[in-house]
Amino acid sequence: MAAAALLVALTCLVTGVLGTALLRSYLLSRSDAQLREFATVASRIVARQQLQPAGNSRPQGLPAQFLVEVVSASGQVSMAGGPLGAADGPRLSEAQLSDTGTPFTAVADGSGGSWRVLVQRLSGGGHLVIASSLGDLDSTVTRLEIADAVAGAVAVVLLAGVGLPLVRASLAPLARIEAVAAAIAAGDLSRRTGQPTGATEVGRLAEALDVMLASIETAYLARADGEARALESEDRMRRFAADASHELRTPLTSVRGLAEYGLQQGSAASRDELLRLMSLIAGEADRMGALVADLLLLARFDAGRPLDRRPVDLASLAAEAVTRARIMDPGRPVTLQAAEPVIIDADAGRLGQVIDNLIGNALQHTPPGSPVTVTVTGARGRGELTVADHGPGMTAEQASRVFERFYRTDSARTRARGGAGLGLAIAASLAAAHGGQISVDTAPGRGAAFHLRLPLAEISQVTATGSQGQHP
């Protein structure tokens, strides 16, 4: 605004000076033209009439607005309309009297007024001096200068009074953008300018800034999420390796102890004692083999190995698992409730392993003779298998960690009762690989119910392939 005001002031000054100079030049040219015209007339009148020295009479035909002098070759002055050398006229020097034919400006000694003077030579000798006052011309030019100065001052004041609020209003969105930038720098990546887009520079700037901030936020959150996932994965791998090493160390320690005991006995050990030691070592080796097989299975699913999926009957798989459970624990009442076939798209072998793990978990961690119920239903585009027991149940903290690898509850899951804490983790991984999920509904003293939910197979696949297995 200061620069604009300065430019306006300079413009007004230049236009004022140029305008007054042009006007003064124009008025002077008109005055000179009048002087030349009058000089022609005056020279004829002077030739016909004899001017008296210091006379008070004006010859007829001489306009009153001009002052006229005739200076003879001897220096005698005859005048008409007042002497030029008087107080109201300019005093001419010898050099000015010799400057003939060209109008010039002279200043009166007394009044200080300006006069336009023209000197011409007379045919009989001497000079004809004609002068006209420039008072009106100077007054006109002065009034124009005053008007230009006032107009320039008013223009600068109007520019400052009107332009400054408009500039502040137009730059107000930049203050909001500055506040948003400060908030972003402070860490609030969700802030946006909120400036409506349009054809203005500020609107386009705000739009570009919002797009840039959205990209920055997305990239930052993706990076933070990736770093969090990496840290979480690294922590899980560290815990997994530690737990696996701990689980493998127990049977290895047993095998080493049994082998050292057999070597110490040497030939003193009986055949039956050696067979017992070998049987114990084989049992620990089987335990290690099962643990390694479970770890390999989890590693395959972590690597995203594909499944051999096809339409299968969830109820038939549940019936087969119930039959196996009854053979393993003949004294345990294991019942199946399935009203109709439930066709899902799954790997039959892996899904059977999930059901076996759920039923085996119920058999292992409930009192002998406690009933276990397996229920299969299908509704709302998914099939659901529920394994419910009447055991001691779990607390909320135990239920939240029951699907973690190597997790065992203090009271219900111990090595003495078998298991490395991988069965439910394997079941959860297999369910996730099938696009489903496992959840548990439990409370202390009222048992536990594990729910396996899987998406139903598409009708076209069932029609083309047919269901595998029959509902018992």
Image (cartoon, rainbow, N blue to C red):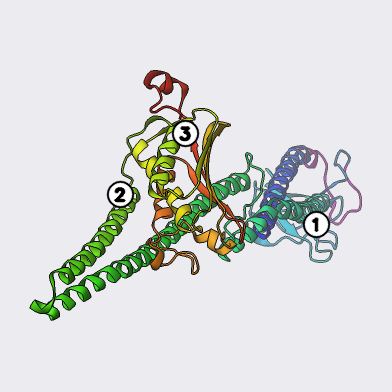
Residue 268 position within the rendered picture, expressed as x and y whole percent measured from the top left: 11, 79
Q: State the SS at label 1.
A: loop
Viewer-side label of 3, 1: 3
Which class describes the residues within 10 Å of circle 2: few (<14), some (14-19), or many (20+)?
few
Q: State the SS at label 2.
A: helix
Point out the tag, 3 or 2, that comes first from the N-terminus. Answer: 2
Residue at figure coordinates x 86%, y 46% from the top left: 65
Which quadrant would residue 304 be assigned to in this image?
top left
Q: Which residue is mark 2?
A: 300
Alpha carbon of mark 3 to alpha carbon of mark 1: how far? 138 Å
Near-viewer residue (427 or 17): 427
Residue 39 position within the rendered picture, expressed as x and y whole percent measured from the top left: 74, 41
Near-viewer residue (234 or 339): 339
Describe residue 364's horizontal placement relative to residue 350 as left or right.
right
Which class describes the residues within 10 Å of circle 3: few (<14), some (14-19), or many (20+)?
many
Alpha carbon of mark 3 to alpha carbon of mark 2: how far? 27 Å
Give the total of numbered labels.
3
Which class describes the residues within 10 Å of circle 1: few (<14), some (14-19), or many (20+)?
many
Residue 84: which disc? 1
Viewer-side label of 1, 2: 2
Residue 315: which disc? 3
Residue 168: which disc? none
Question: Magenta residues?
Answer: 44-59
Q: Amino acid at mark 1?
A: Leu
Residue at figure coordinates x 70%, y 47% from the top left: 19
Near-viewer residue (177 or 422): 422
CB within 8 Å, label 1 to label 2: no
Q: Amino acid at mark 3?
A: Ala
